[in-house]
Image (cartoon, rainbow, N blue to C red):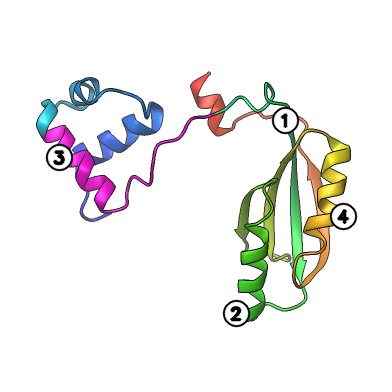
């Protein structure tokens, strides 16, 4: 982050709010002309500050609105076991996020499905069968109060 100045941070902030903003509009918002703004954007992309551009989907409209958070405990936390778990959890499409934690459990998963029955199947058939999993605890989200999508509504 030492390489970033106020203009770079402003560009990143504006792109987070609207990844489809035109370069001309972005330049105007951050106080640059178009060409210097394009150069900075290209540099931010090349240096890995900008990882990509995505569309945010209304999950309710596509029938994928059930969210559960799952605490996962492993029987082994040596590198080999963590690598095996990490590789396997990446293969489960319903797992939207997976975070290793410094807590009394090893991972926190965000799992998105269409309903509770589907979630139970994912938990029983996929998550519980991941390498080294010894215990899981589920917390069902009742309402999305603030999520990435809510910033744009």
- The Cα–Cα distance between marks 2 and 1, rounded to whole angstroms, is 34 Å
The image shows residue 102 at horizontal and vertical percentages of 62, 65
Q: Point out the stretch of residues depicted in magenta.
A: 36-56
10 Å crowding of disc 3: few (<14), some (14-19), many (20+): few
The residue drawn where x is 67% and y is 68% is 85
Using the image as rendered, state which of residue 145 and residue 18 is in the foreground.
Answer: 18
Disc nearer the start of the sequence (3/1): 3
10 Å crowding of disc 2: few (<14), some (14-19), many (20+): few
10 Å crowding of disc 4: few (<14), some (14-19), many (20+): few
Could you tell me which quadrant the N terminus lies in?
bottom left
Residue identified by numbered label 3: 39
Query: Is label 4 in a helix, a strand or a loop?
Result: helix
The image shows residue 57 at horizontal and vertical percentages of 57, 27
Residue identified by numbered label 2: 79
- The Cα–Cα distance between marks 2 and 4, rounded to whole angstroms, is 25 Å
Residue identified by numbered label 4: 124
Residue identified by numbered label 1: 65
Is residue 126 rendered to the left or right of residue 86? right
Query: Is label 1 in a helix, a strand or a loop?
Result: loop
């Amino acid at each position: 982050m030492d390489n970033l100045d106020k203009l770079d941070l402003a560009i990143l902030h504006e792109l987070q709010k609207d990844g489809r903003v035109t370069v001309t509009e972005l330049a105007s918002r951050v106080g640059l002309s178009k060409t210097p703004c394009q150069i900075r954007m290209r540099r931010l992309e090349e240096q890995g500050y900008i990882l990509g551009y995505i569309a945010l989907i209304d999950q309710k409209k596509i029938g994928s609105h059930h969210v559960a958070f799952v605490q996962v405990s492993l029987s082994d936390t040596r590198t080999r076991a963590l690598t095996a778990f990490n590789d396997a959890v990446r293969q489960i499409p319903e797992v939207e996020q997976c975070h290793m934690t410094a807590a009394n459990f090893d991972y926190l998963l965000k799992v998105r499905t269409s309903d509770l029955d589907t979630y139970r199947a994912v938990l029983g058939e996929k998550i519980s069968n991941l390498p080294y999993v010894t215990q899981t605890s589920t917390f069902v989200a009742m309402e999305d109060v603030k999520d990435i999508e809510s910033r744009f509504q």
